[in-house]
Image: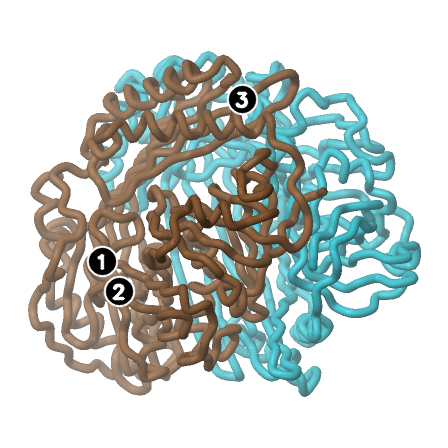
Amino acid sequence: MRQQLVKSESFFLDRFGVTPHHVEHTIGRVLGGAVDYADLYFEYRILESVSLEERMVKHASKNVTQGVGVRAIAREKTGYAFSHDITLEDLELAAGTARYIADHSGREVSVGIDGFKRPDRDLYPLRTPVTEIPVSEKIALLNQIDIIGRQHDPRIKHVLANLTSEYKVVLIATSGGMVIGDIQPLTRLSVTCIAEERGNRQTGTFGGGGRVEFSYFFDRDQYRYYTIEAARRAILNLSAVNAPAGMMTVVLGPGWPGILLHEAIGHGLEGDFNRKGVSAFTGRIGQKVASELCTIVDDGTLPFRRGSLNIDDEGTPTSRTVLIEKGILRGYLQDRLNSRLMKMPLTGNGRRESFAYPPMPRMTNTFMMAGESTPEEIIRSVKSGLYAVAFGGGQVDITSGKFVFSASEAYLIEEGRLTNPVKGATLIGNGPDILTRVSMVGSDLKLDEGIGTCGKEGQTVPVGVGLPTLRIDGITVGGTQ
Amino acid sequence: MTKPEELAQALLRKAKGRGSTEGDVLVVEGDSFSVRVRLGEIDKLEHAREHQLGLRLFFGKRSAVTATSDLSLASLDRLLEDTCALAQSTAQDQASGLPAPDQYVDNVPDLNLWDQRSEDLSVDEKIQLAKNVEAAALDYDPRITNSEGGNFDHYTTRVLYTNSHGFLGQYKASGFSISAVPVATTNGTMQRDYWYSYRRKFDQLDSAEKVGQVAAMRALRRLGAKKVKTQARPVVFEPLMAARLLSHLAMALSGYAIYKGTSFQVGKLGKQIASPQVTIFDDGTLLAGLGSRPFDGEGIATLKTPVIEQGILKSYLLDTYSARKLAMVSTGNAARGVSDSPTVSPNNFYLAAGPWSPEQIVKTVKSGLYVTELIGFGVNMATGDFSQGAAGLWIERGELTFPVEEITIAGNLNQMLCDIEMVGNDLEMRGKISAPTLKISRMMIAGS
């Protein structure tokens, strides 16, 4: 494996005998007639997972997948085919299917490749990817987590832990003559603790990771922090009271609550929905959609982050895109197809789950810039409301703009002070106006720990979010009281 | 290429030579096709051929699973090396291991899961169906102004499972679906909804015209939706949403959630957990059923299992491992992905039809909510606490009146199951998990 770490371009040549000539020939087969753009996406991926439950590492698995996706674009039309086998014959077959959208003539066009390119930077230079670490070290880590969780409190009865690591080599070739490769490591450690007290059973989950080395989890005892946080949440939930129901002032804590931005704003600003005119944000660039305290960016260039990439899955370098600047809607997230049709700049947001799918505009790391208020003064300013610091998942209907996200750790605010912890509740709002109700933004911007996964049209991709402490004057809280 | 069963059996023989005490191989091959038409033109056309092989080996009570899409001999040799190394580093787990040799299905039954049309339909016919379903939605009403498309999809899957006890079974299954996602507009606001038909048999699909029209009707009825004030009221779930509720229950009844203690159904076997009107089956044997399989992920025959009878919990959903942990017997619910150990998933999991028509149910509600959409997660499996975003129609004096949105509904699944006051007669098997219209007597609706 070691030498394969060095160059993604020679990886596919050495392993599958894919030559520049094959690439030129296949793209040439796809192009022509109505087809005005074509690309190939080669992928080799190792996915390894180790998990602990009932005080033992019962499960270890390793999955090696490889394949190539062939795409043809004729204006708005996309033709896509993929194969698990990376041979010239399979490439030919896939090329034939992809160009079905154009016409049936098979006239071959000649395409010249400029030679292999590497990304201009490396946001995740790793000495040793986590998939190369002996499994015994991973098992030892999970066993240690089990002990820490149980020692934290006698009410912690079960600890579940999982370490998943991925090592992905990609090579992208386009009809523009570009061939570029990347190596994309990714890892995630998650811990769930189950607390029991007099028949009341509660769970708490925490975790983190990124495009990082195994040692990341030992720097500053991260693994210990994850475990204790998971245990603390489970214990806290034992005493949680029912959540309130109705419209109220909500203060969001820093970090992962940034999922608000992902659901309320981010998806609605993806180029495909706006080109098709089905987003609640369609045609609103230049308009005020948030309080002027709000500046929101999507940034795929942050080193070692889960949502970051050197190049997107179409070979475009990722970038920092301002979505909302002081309350004004500034831009959309684009892939190649949509930027071309909308005549807007590429932003490096063309992403896909794997070679089995064509790319779409997707977020990378989406967050709000810090403001001026201290978190303490934000909480102190609220007479009666909810303070939510941890969330599970969220979802949005991009056409009506309605979005939800579900709190898993929250407290009542009474007279400017935090009081009872409350049970989980879903919050619901309207994307195009929720941020107009932001009245205070904290100085404490934090990015999440690196566990987010976003789903769209059946494809999942790793993403990041971030938020400073935020006060929203009115959002519906879906409790029972 | 060598036949999959020969590859698989050769792999198990080699594994035995390496000291493996038990093992199994799963090979899944698939063909899929998908076309989306938008505003009358092809938007996206996809075609895929897939094959993956998963190997699980035991060394005594230790085990590991590996998978690959590269079925070359060199790759399978590497896979074997990896599996042996991984398996020998995991912990001894007393409950692990294959089912006993006498537990496998004898003769693999033909459940009529495959349709020849899966191979015979021409690409042009498929594109035409996607065009027709979208056109039916667009033509339904002038307020349908835009579309996220009309879709036609189909797949064929071939499954081969073999293990070191000598079991070898295989089957193939197909699926066809047609759907439309129209957008309705009024006074500058948009609403989107969808409708679909999904079957194992092409001829059983609803017509493109019907699917498109229902999708349009669903989007139109959401126009002008507003918030209602926060209040506790009866809530009626249309069948699709009732099936969503049922899917949470199915997860909570998985033997894994039970033995790990992450389910609100722990310790409830034999107890009244729902209203006496509630009877639920899990049936893997329905002919041409979307959740049917001739054997489960471990080679065990699927069954028709009464899960809840008149509100009393009769059975959890189990595979061999979770059954051993709970000192019970597998219910034929092992689900096995190529790259994972078995887990549990429902087969055809459905709530039996009751006596009431949906209209009769709505008539009984003085003031309440008819739910047509639920969004978000908002379910705590360990406690049953439930809080989800909702949209639907408001019921006044027994009539569906105006559309509502940006609200949540909340309760606890334990109480919600007991509060099922009426069960509809409109059960239709639209997916793996199906339910008729349900009325829950009271939930908290949060709005303005």
Which x, y percent locates residue A44? 24, 49
Q: Earlier in the sequence, mark 1 or mark 3?
A: 3
Subunit that carries the residue with mark 3 = A
Residue A230 lies, with reference to residue B151, above or below; the image says: above
**Front residue (pair B150, A364):** A364
- Residue A301, labelled with which disc? 1
Q: Is residue A413 left or right of residue A22?
A: right
| Mark 3: secondary structure | strand
Which x, y percent locates residue A94? 31, 66
Which x, y percent locates residue A399? 56, 71
Residue A190 lies, with reference to residue B394, above or below; the image says: above
Q: Earlier in the sequence, mark 3 or mark 2?
A: 3
Are tags 1 and 3 found on a single chain?
yes
Look at the image and give the colour of chain B.
cyan
Which x, y percent locates residue B417? 77, 38
Mark 2, Cα crowd under 10 Å, few <14 / some 14-19 / many 20+, is some
